[in-house]
Image (cartoon, grey):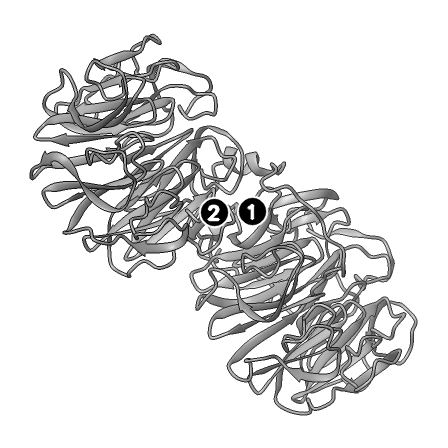
Amino acid sequence: MHFRYRNVVFAAALFVAGAASAAFDARGVLLPLQAVEHLAVGGAFTCAALGQGEVYCWGNNLFGQIGNDSEYPSVDPQRIEGLPQVPITALAAGGGHACALVAGEAWCWGYNQYGQLGDESTADRSVAVRVRQLGGVATQISAGDYHTCAVVEKSIKCWGSNLYGQLGSGDDVDHALPHSVVGLSGSELRVSAGSLHTCAVAAGSAWCWGNNLSGQIGNGETAAAQYSPAAVAVLSGVAEVSAAATHSCARRAAGGVFCWGDNTFGQLGTSNTKPELTPVIVDNLGPPARSVAAATQHSCARTADAVYCWGNGRFGQLGAPGSTATPTLVAGVGATAELATRNAHTCVRTLSGGVLCWGLNLNGQLGDGSAHVRTAPVAVAGDYGNPALITAGTNHTCAALGNGLQCWGYNADGQLGRGVFSTNESLPAPVFVIATRPSSLAAGANHTCAAVAGGALCWGDNEKGQLGIGHVMPRSVPTPVAGLASGVTQVAAGDRHSCALQSGGVWCWGFNGNGELGNGSTSDSKVPTAVSGLSSGVSFIEAGANHTCAVHNGAAKCWGLNTDGQLGLGNNEGFRATPQAVNTLQAGVTRISAGISHTCAVQDGAARCWGYDGYGALGNGVVNDHQFVPDAVSGFDSGVMDVVAGDDISCAIRAGTVWCWGADYSGDLGNGGDVRSLRLLPTPVIGLAGVAAGSLTIGGTHACAATSSGSLRCWGDDLLGALGIGRVVIAYSPLQVVRQDRLFADGLD
């Protein structure tokens, strides 16, 4: 069953903290993103490169900077669209944009008001675009708040905002295409683009240009603007330089770290807050540094076996509570391969290819599946096994795993099977009793059923006897359904009734006011009762809110409520208490799905829907076009593997891609569109093109799908935790479900 209540929209504030988020981090059970080769930290987002053309970003997405062809934020890594499928050699993230080097070319995406994407435009891009007229092979790239710079063969080129001369072109004119920095050339160049100034290393010396109101140029002076490179005083033997907002830092080849500029928060690491117009050595750093990174109001350095941070720690960006003007060890990090920081969060790439982050997390920039400030490192979440069997109720979701079942979301009626009654469990956790993988799952409005080892189990709300256990008391743990201990291959759950397929025959129980049980009566039943005429030959069953359907010898049959024509009988009259043949679907039916007031089926590879169509859920391109017999879904006349009917939406899988159509109440179409909008034709779900595998399900105002890579993605309304991502959020595109047990990493016990 797939539930939604028409015209009822739950409003939720984006990234309001969920109660359960801290628990899974404290236990250290998040499976980390792995095989990371490059790391970059932006203003309120983060990016990582994993392989050939594989860049993932997460966090703030106001300008499209996480590059997934939308403008909606994500606390889970989202793959960048548009990059060539060849190895990534460098990665950079700025205030609101990011860039990657691919085969010597620069590709950028995100904020572009000043031309910082280098594509000769000022239009923001939510997919990667190639930087034009680079003039050679790029070997290093750096993104500032409003500009970008790259090392191109033996020169440095910059583009974007130039208000303070940060492009080093000798003027203050913005450039939407790369321009050479005046006077710097050589074979060993490095560049760092800060907020409004830029620094570089050339022949072992440090040079800076741009805004110098705080002395961040390091030449012993202050000035509004420096239009061409100025030598940083004192320093020699420089291997690396990092430009921040109002201060800069450099690392000598021998490992010493020096900083200069504003020091209001102790970001120079000198044990005091005195500003410096020329470089001063960072105190008490310990072993020689291997890299240094300066952020807005703090700095960090990486040594052979540790990471140290100093400056403003208000948001946990130092990896420990509080602020300090002296380098402080970040606990729990150890040896790392890469260090990156920018505004108020910090990340490192581990030697094993994972990513740890800490600090401000309002936009999900730490990638740990939450929106909580972290004062200690947390792992960026990756994929979590292969839960190919999923089901969604009104506000809860369940997934079958190798050694059992996990559920999450609303639990006031015990529908999560955890042995307790609670309001909101936003992270997956094991269902009690079930220790083997279920063969079938079904979630009703507020109850759940599973087929395990041939028997049927149900739990949750039992007001109408929908658990099939002989009484109407709720159960918070799975309980055997009376008389169905063997031979059960599939279960189905409606609003307040349930069904099972046993040895080719159908049994139903629970509410029967509209003939949902198909036994010729309208009396409720607390135990299974045989469906009339369906004692054998049934291959598939599905329960809607108040009607039920089955595939019987290749034909579709439905029974129950018919006030919207959802039984497909050619009319919308009353109800039917026994199975009725659906018009035109007498053969070739492989799947059928009963929603609230409409029904869909797959016949000979084509998708067909019928019933209520006030919001375009029939997918025929017309709204309010009620159909009392099956009608073709536009463009889906072949290759459809599965179709699912919800309330006012439907979804289907074709060629490994998930498509949805109908009313978008809370992001439940998954295409990044506005809420309270309509899609009258099938529209691809973002990030699920060619990767869908296993089951697809629609809940109240959320949906979930399994992918071929082994992850489970959910989208839509998470007010009560139904998305399984650890916090309350409306997700306009699919997000990864957080897994809590490492044993389930590959779906096996």
Q: Give the x, y percent position of residue 420.
A: 73, 43
From this view, report whether residue 241 is shown above or below residue 438: above
Residue appearing at x 51%, y 30% in the figure? 373
Task: Residue 41: tell me if it is visible.
Answer: yes
What residue is disc 2 on?
A: 76
Residue appearing at x 30%, y 16% in the figure? 268
Label 2: state its secondary structure: strand
Q: Give the x, y percent position of residue 607.
A: 60, 80
Determine whether label 2 and label 1 are within 8 Å by CB: yes
From this view, report whether residue 603 is shown above or below residue 419: below
Task: Residue 283: tell me if it is visible.
Answer: no
Left of 568 or right of it: where is 674? Answer: left
Q: Earlier in the sequence, mark 2 or mark 1?
A: 2
Left of 363 or right of it: where is 347? Answer: left
The foreground one among 149 and 508 is: 149
- State which quadrant residue 202 falls in: top left
From this view, report whether residue 9 is shown above or below residue 437: above
- State which quadrant residue 455 falls in: bottom right
Count the labels in the image.
2
From this view, report whether residue 609 is shown above or below residue 553: above
What residue is disc 1 on?
A: 725
Label 1: state its secondary structure: loop
Which image quadrant: the N terminus? bottom right
The foreground one among 585 and 474 is: 585
Residue appearing at x 45%, y 66% in the figure? 689
Looking at the rendered image, the disc whose residue lies closer to the viewer, 2 or 1, is 2
